[in-house]
Amino acid sequence: MGTIGTEGNPLRVAIVGSGPTGFYAAGHLFKQQDLNIEVDMFERLPTPYGLVRGGVAPDHATIKNVTKQFDRIAHHPRYRFFGLVELGRDVRIEDLQRHYHMILITTGAQTDRHLDIPGENLPRSHAATEFVAWCNGHPDYRDRKFDLSVDTAVVVGVGNVAMDVARILARSHEELSKTDIADHALAALAESKIKRIVIIGRRGPLQTAFTLPEIRELGDMPNACVEIAERDVELTPLDLEIMQNGLDQQTSRKFEVMQQYAQNHLNGKNRRIIFKFLASPLELIAGPDGGVGSIKIVRNELYRNGDGSVRPRPTDEITELPAGIVFRSVGYRGVALPGVPFDEKRGVVPNAEGRVKDAQNGEWIPGLYTAGWIKRGPSGMIGATKMDSGETVQCMIEDLQAGRVQEPEVAGAEAALEMIRQRRPEFIDFENWQKLDALELKRGQETGRPRVKFTSVPEIMQALNR
């Protein structure tokens, strides 16, 4: 085996997944001095950027600016993008092992967690993640149907995705028409009859997962007011204990904002966003048409668990609320990939600091790594993702220096390209994506919007004359 990482024998890395984690990992790899590293990135969709394109709410355009960093990484001379190439369908893990020294899995957490309550599968019961993806024109979700002809929507969960759903439902057509929301979603939301959006959190206001900017933004909406019952922001003895022990600055400020909302009164705005804390859903109840008609909830109280965490437990206070449509937003979960170990209980790839472990014997699988949410679970914002990918790349470099590297049977870049051409001849490279990006931006300029997306694979291929 010759020295790996030289001009004549570059370190060949395959990254599966083109979200922020994958791009940050590529960036970390390219920063390694005195090493020649080639990165091929594989993405099952025709477009890159993962949740930044398909999961960030359309009205949060500034967050999407992070793609400018990813574009700079993609212009590295030793970077290649293979869109529309799916692990398990077009290539197997064994194929990648034949062509690369190292494989890095960065596919994120692609599905949602369930409520596991009666009635969850009724019509008009949805995952919040699917709704946001539908709004963003994600090809997997563009054909979803959401009945917005009802009066009341209920969102279960108090994270940022729950806030995104509530905010989009409360936006006016005029507001949404200034975003890059998909055309089909813009048209459907223009006909929405929803006037009340109820947000349910199983714990109290001091345990909410949304960020300070998210809760503040709700109060600045021109066509919706935020309501919180004073009962829901009253401090319990446990709350007082928590506050005496010291709150972090963000939690303290979030609580102040929520206290201000508790003083709100009806102000004539078209829509209302109503928070209900210390409440857990027990059942979704069908209405006359067979779809969701109401939701049964139980009032909780907080207690300190044996490990010191603050947990909710039900009381005997049960109520039923009108609910024409329900969105669950109680967390993401990773999806198993063919040929890659998977921890079904945690929904992640089993690993130690990014080194993938065999699910049976716990031993490290040489040359196989993971980063991001599929590595650690769905927690942390983009900054945490950058740090996490850096940790994994550090392990990869340490293993290279220690000689713990698998020598591929066919290591050349041309051989890998030929394999992809045979398996998926219509793959999308980064130049194709740039053309598509320019077309979307042009369509946006013509309509006074940031961009107008192509939202199906056939539509994208036609636009690219492929």
Image (cartoon, rainbow, N blue to C red):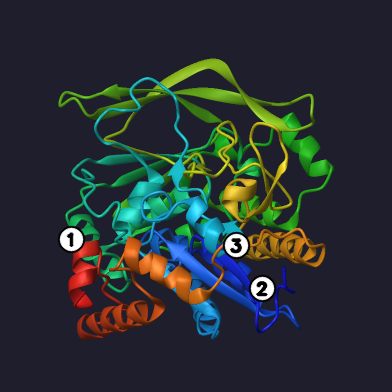
The residue depicted at 66 percent of the width and 43 percent of the height is: 206
Q: Which mark is residue 187?
A: 1
The reply to whether dot 2 and dot 1 touch (C-beta < 8 Å) is no
Q: Which mark is residue 453?
A: none
Give neighbour class at mark 1: few <14, some 14-19, many 20+ (Cα, 10 Å): few
> Tag 3: residue type?
Pro
- How far across and down, in percent of the image, does residue 304 sit? 75, 27
- As helix, strand or loop, the secondary structure at mark 1 comes to helix
Q: Is residue 108 left or right of residue 190?
A: right
How many numbered dots are placed on residues in this image?
3
Q: What's the distance in space between the residues labelled 2 and 1, CA to CA?
A: 43 Å
The residue depicted at 24 percent of the width and 58 percent of the height is: 185
Q: Nearer the viewer, mark 2 or mark 3?
A: 3
Q: Nearer the viewer, residue 137 or 415?
A: 415
> Tag 1: residue type?
Ala
Q: Nearer the viewer, residue 60 or 98?
A: 98
- How far across and down, in percent of the image, does residue 15 sit? 54, 63
Which residue matches tag 2? 29
Q: What's the distance in space between the residues labelled 1 and 3, CA to CA?
A: 51 Å
- How far across and down, in percent of the image, does residue 378 sit? 58, 48
Q: Earlier in the sequence, mark 1 or mark 3?
A: 1
Viewer can see residue 178: yes
Q: Nearer the viewer, mark 1 or mark 3?
A: 3
Q: Is residue 364 above or below residue 101?
A: above
Viewer can see residue 269: no
Q: Is residue 244 above or below residue 304?
A: below
Q: Earlier in the sequence, mark 2 or mark 3?
A: 2
Quadrant of res 422: bottom left
